[in-house]
Amino acid sequence: MHGSVDLSGSAPDPKRQLIVSHARKRFVSEGYAATKIEPIAREAGVSTATLYTLFGGKAELFAAVIDDAAEDFARQMACVRAVEGDARLTLTSFAEAYADFMGDPFVRAVFRLVMAERPRFEAVALRFFEKGRAEFGATLIGILVRLSETGALKPVQRPSWAAGQLMGMIEHPVFFVPLVTGDEVRMRRSNAEVVADAVETFLARHGA
């Protein structure tokens, strides 16, 4: 889930991919302020001059890392859309992907960075969050409408509300609790347990 994406449509540059991959690890583990360009270039096997030619500086590199992660999650959603099965299987597949997204330390790192340096990275971070939530929200709404039409769920009058209920049951334990308590604190429940509980609760209300 760490490949770089060239949005221009041309073949991705292997050097650029490698730099983004190593930069992502550094930003997640060290934060923006403490991350240095030189170690990233060294780990990627390129000169500092080459890195600056490709990205211009640390801020541009960070923006590239965020955009790359957003594309990763979009590809992840494409796989979820392809899942066919009963309501439990389909909703579990979605919920697992969403839990992976919201539980990714990089997502929390971006959120913390926005809070710490909002004026500098607000546009980049909002693009990341809006793309992620739009991808997941639109995917789940489509799933709920399809399952409702086939009789696998009760008729869903407001799919966006129902989608928000399922997503909310996942967001709180895998994103907001670690955000407040810190990544070092071990969750009481695994992502798989959170997903199972959320899907069970959702089906108890909406299942046919």
Image: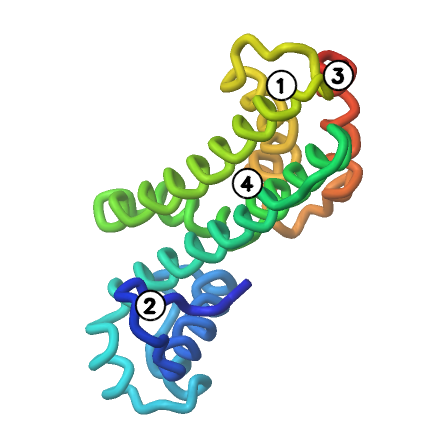
**Mark closest to the chain's N terminus, 1 or 2:** 2
Crowding near the residue tagged with mark 1, few <14, some 14–19, many ≥20 C-alpha atoms within 10 Å: few
Crowding near the residue tagged with mark 3, few <14, some 14–19, many ≥20 C-alpha atoms within 10 Å: some
Question: Label 2 to label 3, Cα distance in Å?
Answer: 42 Å
Q: Which of the pair 187/202 is nearer the observer? A: 202
Question: Label 1 to label 4, Cα distance in Å?
Answer: 37 Å
> What type is the residue that disc 1 sits on?
Glu
Image coordinates of residue 152 in percent, x first then y, are 73, 21
Marks 2/3 in contact by CB < 8 Å: the verdict is no
The residue where tag 1 is placed is 149
Crowding near the residue tagged with mark 4, few <14, some 14–19, many ≥20 C-alpha atoms within 10 Å: some
Question: Label 2 to label 4, Cα distance in Å?
Answer: 31 Å
The residue where tag 4 is placed is 179
> What type is the residue that disc 3 sits on?
Gly
Front position among marks 1 and 4: 1
**Mark closest to the chain's N terminus, 2 or 4:** 2
Check residue 192 in the rendering and tell me which mark sits there, or answer none: none
Image coordinates of residue 93 in percent, x first then y, are 69, 41
Q: Is residue 205 above or below residue 71?
A: above
